[in-house]
Amino acid sequence: MAEIREKVNSVQAGENPLGTKKIGFLMLQFAIPAVISNLVNASYNLVDQALIGNVVGMLGIAATNIAFPLTTICAAVGYLLGTGGASNYNLQLGKGDKDAANRYACNILSLLVIIGVAIGAITLIFVKPLVFAFGATERVAPMAFSYTTITAIGIPFSIFTTGACALIRADGHPRYSMGCMLAGAIFNIVTDPIVALVFDWGLVGLAWTSTIGQMLSAGIAVFYYLRITKTISLKREYFRPRSNLAKNICALGLTPSINQLGVTIVQITMNNTLRYYGAMSVYGSDIPLAAVGAISKLTVIFTAFVVGVAQGCQPINGFNYGAQKYDRVKKTLRLSLTVGGILSLSAFAVFQLFPRQLMVIFGENDPLYLEFSVRYLRIFMFTIFLSGVQPIAATFFPSIGKAGHGLLISLSRQIIFLLPLLLILPIFFGLNGAVYAGPASDFAAACVSGTLIVREAKKLTALQKARL
């Protein structure tokens, strides 16, 4: 019986294009949709910040930077329920238990709604203390209050879209899932210039377009469950939240969620560090807050490419590792690291050679703001040529069943290195300490990622030889 099963698996592996087609072709096939999706969302954020910088000014950028932790909190909840729920949904379908799969699917949707509404309500009730806790100064606070109050209305829709789209992918419709995510971003890219430049509605108008875009994406996701899916059964009794299902959902969604929560903690720490030590410098508190907010949108463009490559390689690595085709896993890993390295070196060259031209995109009304931004961009991103290793490694290890390694790599830059450095270095170097924390943490995280990859490559070679 075991021999028959092995032959069947071998035939299935041979027929699956993931196990036979050229690695380069597969990477293009899987990575391009992921890159496009990430890039459109990154472009929306860039356009949004550029408009705010030129129409509203430096304080407007600082205000959106203060509100940014709420975005990562929404992503953390969406990933926790969406990724964890989708994994359980697929596991139950694989076992042939459609009833259990439907219960997981409906529990995901109900939990997304309940928790999303709760977080949105809490944000609206405690918006003022939250804004100051996130690092707002007295000058930035009024704009941050207005912007956060409006965007808080979109929190339930943002959380629902993130989680619901993960389930849509699991249900066999990745293009529809991508369309849901892109709809809101494309809506914003089109409407933001009209709102800001034609109607001159400023930060409040841009906050509303962001919220409406999130509603649009959520509506498209809801339409899928009501009209398109043939697999998921929306029975009323399935929607009642169950603790045992919620526990299993959270267990499998914890890794990507913790990563986003790490980003949130670091962002809040960074804002408060810049506010405190910036006040002791010639730049004041508002300029560093605005500069970091603008620069983070530039780096998201780079991240969109590298993360897209990593996401595109995930199914290739997972299938071939399961099929014991370790040579193809090594080739995929090697090619992804090469592409990531090229992208990282390109980003390094752009950031070092054209920092002023990049920062002018966000306005140039304040010479001190432009001076600090250019200096911060060059120093904070000095080791970005190493940054391609971490996201590729963080995606690679879970794809071959080693989630612990992936979690360690995901947390290495933000929590293990950057957070302590943000707390320690400014004590000795003031505002400069916050600036130098970036390249130091990038270097340390790249060392961790590189070490684990080298060890795993040796193991893959040994496994490959054992099969010969």
Image (tube, rainbow, N blue to C red):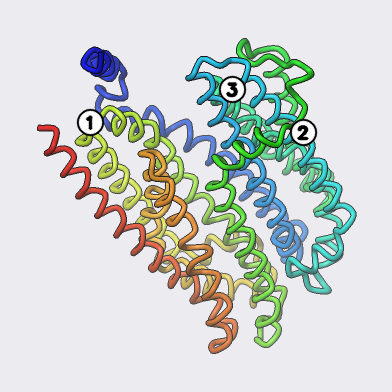
For label 2, the crowd category at 10 Å Cα-Cα, with few meaning under 14, some 14 to 19 and many 20 or more, is many
Quadrant the C terminus occupies: top left
* Residue that sits furthest to the right in the current view: 125
Q: Which residue is mark 3?
A: 176
Helix, strand or loop at label 2? It is: helix
Tell me residue 96's x, y (percent).
Answer: 51, 15
Q: Between 230 and 178, which is closer to the camera in this rendering? A: 230
User: What residue do we see at 58% from left, 70% from top?
Assistant: 373
Disc 2 from disc 1: Cα separation: 44 Å
- Closer to the chain start, of discs 2 and 1, is 2
Position of residue 19 in the picture relative to residue 174 (left or right): left
Q: Which mark is residue 325?
A: 1
Residue 219 sits above or below residue 401 on the image: above
For label 1, the crowd category at 10 Å Cα-Cα, with few meaning under 14, some 14 to 19 and many 20 or more, is some
Position of residue 232 in the picture relative to residue 18 (left or right): right
Residue 195 sits above or below residue 100 on the image: below
Q: How many marks?
A: 3
Tell me residue 257's x, y (percent).
Answer: 59, 48
